[in-house]
Image (cartoon, helix red, strand yellow):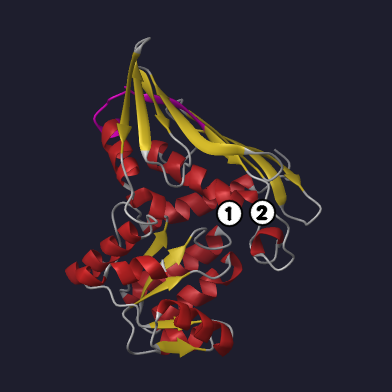
């Protein structure tokens, strides 16, 4: 994101400050990206009057506190996925932002990529008819690092919050909020979910079958099936550049959607446009949907609750 913000200077972006839990870490990061100002705490960054907007990229367990501090100091906030640890935290910071009239958005950067914009348009136009089924997921085996949040339940680790959130968000974008969530997970030796399988049932009969695993390897992709065709969203699902539309037996069309840079810059541009227009939310990633996604993730994590 720091690199993308530097590249967006012609569009008016200025990367002015970085805050971390220690001054040393902030200064190291600042030197790497030629940032003028540093803060030795996230609270000090939030209070900096020279900042218009903050990108929160801390571990998930810190998101709610970081967002709260920024909003209380009048900052616009773009907060990394997963938005918070749970729906209760999301509900709290959303209420605060709306009360203060501050811009707040989940940094679900995938939503703003050209391929996903095109997918939304295709579905809206009825290109494959009514969507009946979504099947998607991926698997990766990360190297163990005791200090990395992915392996810490306290910091918000595990496969579902780290990678599964992309799948749930994509399903939400295409099908809306599910009426019922069924899930199964395997908790690994580090206390986080190593494998998850979700079945999301919708009132109109549509279903989404989603999976994520930290125990196997498969590039994450998704297929969306309608009653008049299907669309394959090529891997990686979090940064797709190719859609294949199939109608009939052999009528397949592959469309390419290149991504500029890392892909993180698209959401930054939308944030800038929203602030210039005086908006406090963005239609493609509204806060009500972010809250709904967190509620779905909460339901999915009731692995041991009676059904």
**Image quarter (top left, top right, bottom left or bottom right) of the C terminus:** top right
Q: Can residue 202 be seen in this view?
A: no
The answer to whether marks 1 and 2 mark residues whose Cβ atoms lie closer than 8 Å is yes
Q: As drawn, which residue projects farthest toward the top? A: 249
Q: How far from the left and from the top, in percent, is residue 113? A: 34, 48
Q: How far from the left and from the top, in percent, is residue 214? A: 68, 46
Residue found 54% across the figure and 71% down from its top: 58
**Image quarter (top left, top right, bottom left or bottom right) of the N terminus:** bottom left
Residue that label 1 marks? 162
* Residue 134 within the segment the image draws in magenta: yes
Q: Can residue 233 be seen in this view?
A: yes
Residue that label 2 marks? 158
Q: Quadrant of residue 124?
A: top left
Q: Describe the element under mark 1 as helix, strand or loop.
A: helix
Q: Describe the element under mark 2 as helix, strand or loop.
A: loop
What distance separates the C-alpha of mark 1 from that of mark 2? Answer: 6 Å
Residue found 70% across the figure and 55% down from its top: 143
Q: As drawn, which residue projects farthest toward the left? A: 277
Q: In this view, does 262 lie to the left or right of 138?
A: left
Q: Quadrant of residue 115?
A: top left
Residue found 61% across the figure and 49% down from its top: 160
Residue found 21% across the figure and 68% down from its top: 11
Bounds of the magenta segment: 123-135
């Amino acid at each position: 994101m720091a690199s993308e913000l530097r590249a967006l200077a012609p569009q008016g972006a200025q990367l002015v400050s970085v805050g971390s839990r220690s001054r040393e870490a902030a200064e190291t990061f600042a030197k790497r990206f030629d940032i003028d100002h540093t803060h030795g705490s996230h609270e000090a960054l939030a209070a900096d009057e020279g900042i218009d907007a903050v990108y929160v990229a801390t571990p998930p367990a810190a998101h709610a506190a970081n967002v709260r501090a920024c909003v209380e100091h009048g900052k616009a906030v773009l907060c990394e996925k997963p938005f918070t640890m749970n729906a209760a935290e999301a509900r709290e910071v959303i209420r605060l932002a709306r009360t203060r009239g501050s811009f707040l958005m989940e940094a679900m950067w995938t939503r703003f990529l050209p391929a996903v914009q095109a997918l939304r348009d295709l579905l809206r136009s009825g290109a494959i008819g009514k969507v009946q089924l979504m099947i998607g997921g991926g698997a990766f085996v990360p190297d163990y690092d005791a200090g990395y949040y992915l392996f810490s339940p306290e910091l918000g680790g595990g496969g579902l919050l780290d990678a599964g959130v992309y799948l749930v968000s994509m399903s939400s974008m295409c099908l809306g909020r599910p009426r019922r969530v069924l899930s199964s997970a395997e908790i690994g030796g580090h206390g986080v979910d190593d494998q998850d399988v979700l079945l999301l049932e919708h009132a109109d009969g549509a279903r989404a079958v989603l999976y994520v695993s930290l125990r196997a390897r498969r590039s994450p992709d998704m297929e969306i099936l309608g009653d008049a065709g299907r669309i394959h969203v090529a891997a990686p699902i979090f940064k797709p550049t190719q859609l294949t539309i199939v109608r009939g037996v052999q009528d397949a069309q592959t469309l390419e959607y290149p991504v500029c840079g890392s892909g993180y810059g698209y959401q930054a541009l939308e944030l800038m446009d929203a602030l210039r227009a005086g908006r406090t939310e963005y239609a493609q990633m509204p806060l009500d949907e972010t809250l709904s996604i967190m509620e779905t993730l909460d339901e999915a994590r009731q692995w041991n609750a009676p059904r």
